Image: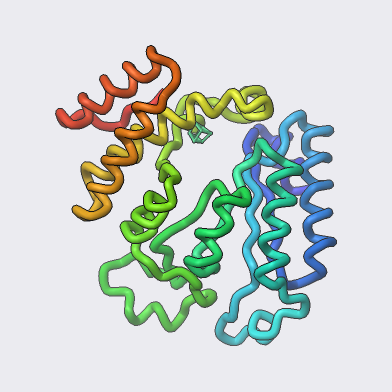
Amino acid sequence: MAMHRAQEAGIDDVGIGALFGLHDYKYEVMGLLLHALQLEKDCGVGPHTISIPRLEPALNAPAAIRPPHPVSDHDFKKLVAILRLAVPYTGIILSTRETSAIRNEVFDLGISQISAGSRTNPGGYQEDSSEGFRAAQFNLGDTRTLDEVIGDITALGHIPSFCTACYRLGRTGRDFMELAKPGLIQKFCRTNAILTFKEYLLDYASPLTRAAGDELCSRLVEETPNARTRQTISRRLAKMEGGQRDMYV
Ligand code: SF4
């Protein structure tokens, strides 16, 4: 009911999820799908995102060390594909709990959002956080740096996007669903992905990631089918090279 109450109170973008490992994963998946349907029926807006963390070992948490219903890698990949097919408009989120090998595999099955360079201990993002590591909430499966993750995504041929345009332009709730459900949102996503990726490459990437990323960006611009969109992206990329930042549509 929390998500229904949030929508009634005016929060028009909600995300749902389940912590896999506590109960039969098939029940959890059906629960998520029914929850998505009910939100659509009652609020006119389905979940903006679905998160699918798997229970990971954590200090002083016996249930996390021996999950009552562990989900195998095979079943995990299957449930990602089922959620993607059943709720095509939603973002499916994967955390750094999973290993880099699993994370790279499930991009092709439907994962659209991931975290990177995460710390799960209080104060973990401070420069000297070695003390806090002892208080980590759970074990991380992927300890790569952000740059390594971005480099690997680039090598797989996917566009790493840092876009938050919809939230910033108020494209949320029903407005978002009207674009997302028929797939119209992708024209914004693609342009914004190229622009925000370029900004990352210019300001934060290592030389290796920068070179691979620039090559990917150039290819994506060339492959943009609509000539006007292609010109707009090229113009904006040139402005970015000249120092302008924070461009989105
Ligand atoms: S335009 Fe940006 S914020 Fe909106 S759905 Fe696409 S990637 Fe997400």
Q: Please, which colouring scheme is shown?
A: rainbow
Q: On the picture, is 168 further left or further right than 126?
A: right
Tell me if residue 169 comes above or below residue 136 in the rendering.
above
Query: Residue at (27%, 74%) from the top-left corner?
Result: 128
86 with respect to 61 (left or right): right
In this orientation, which residue lies closer to the viewer: 60 or 159?
Answer: 159
As drawn, the residue found furthest toward the left would be 242
Q: Is residue 4 above or below residue 28?
A: above
Q: Is residue 240 left or right of residue 139?
A: left
Residue at (62, 48) in percent of width and height:
110
Q: Is residue 34 above or below residue 55?
A: above
User: Image quarter for residue 72?
Assistant: bottom right
Establish if 65 lies above or below 27.
below
Marker count (numbered): 0
Residue at figure coordinates x 42%, y 59% from the top left: 116
Out of 138 and 71, give the one closest to the viewer. Answer: 71
Q: Quadrant of the C terminus?
A: top left
